Amino acid sequence: MAEIDSGITEPLISVTGVTKHYLRGSETVRAVDGVDLSLYPGEMVAIVGPSGSGKTTLVNTLACLDTPTTGSVRVNGVETRDMSEDELVSVRRGFFGFVFQKFYLLPTLTVAENVELPLLFLRRPASRRSTISLLESLGLSSRTDHLPRELSGGQMQRVAIARALIVKPRVLIADEPTGSLDRGTGEGIFDLFEDLCQQGLTIIVTTHNLALAERAHRMITLEDGKIAREESKGSQRS
Amino acid sequence: MLAETHLFGFFALAIKNLLRRLVRTILTTIGVALAVAVAVSLAGFVNGYKTAISRSIDLLGFQVMVMAKGCPYEAATMMLKGGTGLLYLPMSTFDQVSTDKSVSAITPVFIGVAEKEQTSIREDAASSFIVVSGINTQSFTEMKPWLTFQSGEGFKGGRWFSDGETREVVLGYEVAEYEQRKVGDTIELSITPAGALAPKSHEFNVVGILARTGTQDDGTVFMPLARAQEIFNRPDQITLVGAKLREFSTAAIRQFEERWLSLPEVQIVGLQQVKSTLLSLVGTAQIMIGAVAAIAIIVAIIGVVNTILMSVYERTGEIGIMKAIGARRSDIFELIWYETLALCIGGGITGVVIAFLGSGIIEYLLRRLIDVGVQGDLVSISPAIMGLSVGSTVIIGFFAGLYPAWRASSMRPLEAIRSGE
C-alpha cells in the first residue's frame, strides 16, 4: 500500500452512525448500516466488497449525492444531514470530483468541452490552455477535439478524470472506475490516482479488484452495509 | 471551448443537444415555422386587405355617391370594382344634385360592361369583360386630379378625349397591359345595348393610357359620357353621381342625404360608411382567421413540448451527471428552457421568412382563386407583424419550456443517473 503523510488530524469528511435504508416493496433494505468513517486530506481510500454490500451507497452519501437515513455526515466541518438538494449542490460543487464506471461523457461535446463542462456550472471562466495542459498530463493532448465515441474505454475514463479534476476538487470520488476497463488500463488509472494523491488530492475509490485496492492507503471492506474490515498501511482491524 | 460566458455556454450546449437529433429538431422547427408562417400570412392578408380597401376607397375621389337604391354591399362593390348587375338613375338626378350648395365638385358617371374581343395575347390572365366608364372629362378629372397619362415609348401624346367625340377612348393601365395597346392603337369592344339580344362591335381609337393608380380605374375603359349612353342604349341615364362636399363631416353627409333621399329610388352612400362596412366585414373574417392561426400555433407548441420532453427522458442519465458535477436545478432548468426557446425562435424566424417570401405566391393565388375586389398589395407583412410574430413565439416558447424544464430540473442526480443506465 502507498505511504501517507503522518501528522494529519482534521478529517475532510467524517461520518458517524450512518445508515441508509430503502424500501423495496414491503421489505426494508439496509444498504448502509451504521458506518463510522473519517477521511483525511491526501489519502487514498479503497472501498471493496461484494456486489450489494453498500459501496456505492456509502460513497454517494459521503459525496453528498444522497442523504443518510440516520447518522451524521460532516464535509469540511459542515453537517450535511438535513440539507436540501440545492444546499447539497452548494457543498459538493468544486469540493468533489466524480468519476463513474460508465464515464458519462456528453456525446455531443468534444473531449475539451466535456472537461470544461463543470466550469460552466460553477460560473468559472474556462481557459483552453489549462484544459490542454490537464489533458496533456493525462496523455490525451492529441484527443482534445475528438468526440467521446472516437475514444477507447481507457481514454474516456481519463477524460472523465480530467473533467473531475478541472475544478481542482479537494476530494475525488471514483465509483468502480476500472469496472469497464481491461487490467492494464485499470492499473494505469490507479497509477494516475497515486500521482494525484501525492499532489495532495484525497481519493475515495470503490472497486472489486483487490489487487488495485491494495495500492490505496486504506482499504475498507463492506459486507451487508457494515464495515467488515479496515486495513491500512501496516495494520488491520475488523 | 463551450463559451466565455455561462449564458452563451448554456446556449451552445442547448444547440448541440438539439443538433443531436437533427431530423427530429428539423421536423419540430418546420412545424413551428409553418404555424408561424400561416399566422403571419393571415395577419399580413388582413392588414394588406384592410389597407387596400381603405386606399381603393380613398382614391375613388368621391366623398359621397348618389346611386340607385340597392344593397349597400353591392354599392360598395360597385365603388371598388365598377360593378355588375348595374342599376341606373335618370340624368336629371345629376342636374338636381348639382344645385346643392354644399357640393364643391360633382361628376356624373355611366358604368357599363363590354365584352372583350378575342385579341389579347393574355386571355388567361384577364376576365372576358371590361368595365366601361362614360365620363365628363372636366368634372371627372377635377374629382381625381392624380390621374396622369403614361409616358415613354408608345405612350407619347396621351390625352383625354373631348366630350363630343365618338371614337376616342382612354385606357386604364391594366387594360392597356392586358390588351397590349398603346397610344394610337385601336381597340374593339363588344357591347350589348339595353333591350337588344346580341352584342354589337365597336372600334375605338386609343388616345391615352393612364398611369397606374392601384384602383378600379386601372381596369376601366373611359369614353365620353354621351357616347357611352348611346352605345349602351341608355340615353339620359347614369349609374352614379360622385360628389365632394364643401364640408366633409358626418353631419354634412347626413344633411346632404336628407335633402336628396326624397328623390325616387335613390340612395346616398358616404365614403366613410362604405369603408367601415367593408372593414367590419374583414374584421369578422379576422376573428376566424385568428382562430385558425391560434390552432396551428397550439398544435406546433404541443409538438415542441413533446420533442423537448422526449429529449429530457432520453438524457435523464446525462442530466443526473450534470447535477453531480455541479449543475444546480436552475442550471438544468435554464438549459432545457433554452432548448425550447431555440426551437421556437428558430421556427418563428423561419416562419416569418417563409411568409415573407411566400406572400407574393399567396397574393397571386388569392387573385386567381377569388375575386378580391381591390387593387394594391393584398398581403402586407409589415415589420410590426414580423416583430410581433417572433415576439409571440418567444413568449409562447417561454411558457412551453416551463414544464419540460421543471421536469428535468426536479430530477435527483442519483435517480437520474440510475434511470439513465
Image (spheres, rainbow, N blue to C red):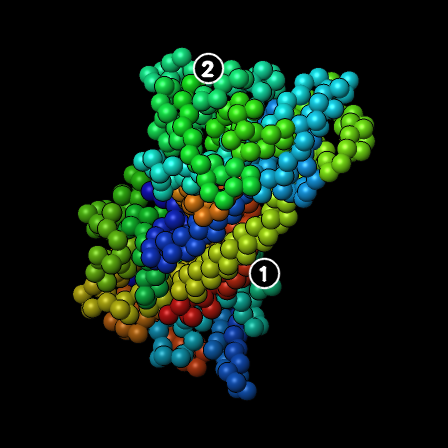
Q: Residue at x 41, y 37 (%)?
A: B116
Q: Which residue is mark 1?
A: A84
Q: From this viewpoint, is residue A125 visible? A: no
Q: Which type of secondary structure does the marked residue at label 1 adopt?
A: loop
Q: Nearer the viewer, residue B256 or B344?
A: B256
Q: Which type of secondary structure does the marked residue at label 2 adopt?
A: loop
Q: Residue at x 40, y 52 (%)?
A: B30
The quadrant of the image that shows the C terminus of chain B is bottom left
Quadrant in which residue A83 is drawn: bottom right
Q: Which residue is mark 2?
A: B159
How many other residues sit within 10 Å of disc 1, few (<14), some (14-19) or many (≥20)? few
Q: From this viewpoint, is residue A47 visible? A: yes
Q: Position of residue B40 (x, y in %)?
A: 50, 44
Q: Residue furthest front?
A: B196
> What amino acid type is highlighted by mark number 2?
Arg
Q: Residue at x 43, y 19 (%)?
A: B208
Quadrant in which residue A47 is drawn: bottom left
The chain that hosts pointer 1 is A
The chain that hosts pointer 2 is B
In space, the residues marked 1 and 2 are separated at their CA atoms by: 89 Å
**B160 left or right of B2?**
right
Q: Nearer the viewer, mark 1 or mark 2?
A: 2
How many other residues sit within 10 Å of disc 2, few (<14), some (14-19) or many (≥20)? some
Q: Position of residue A229 (x, y in %)?
A: 39, 77
**B34 left or right of B43?**
left
Q: Residue at x 55, y 54 (%)?
A: B292
Quadrant in which residue B156 is drawn: top left
Q: Nearer the viewer, residue A79 or B158?
A: B158
**B89 left or right of B189?**
right
> What amino acid type is highlighted by mark number 1?
Ser
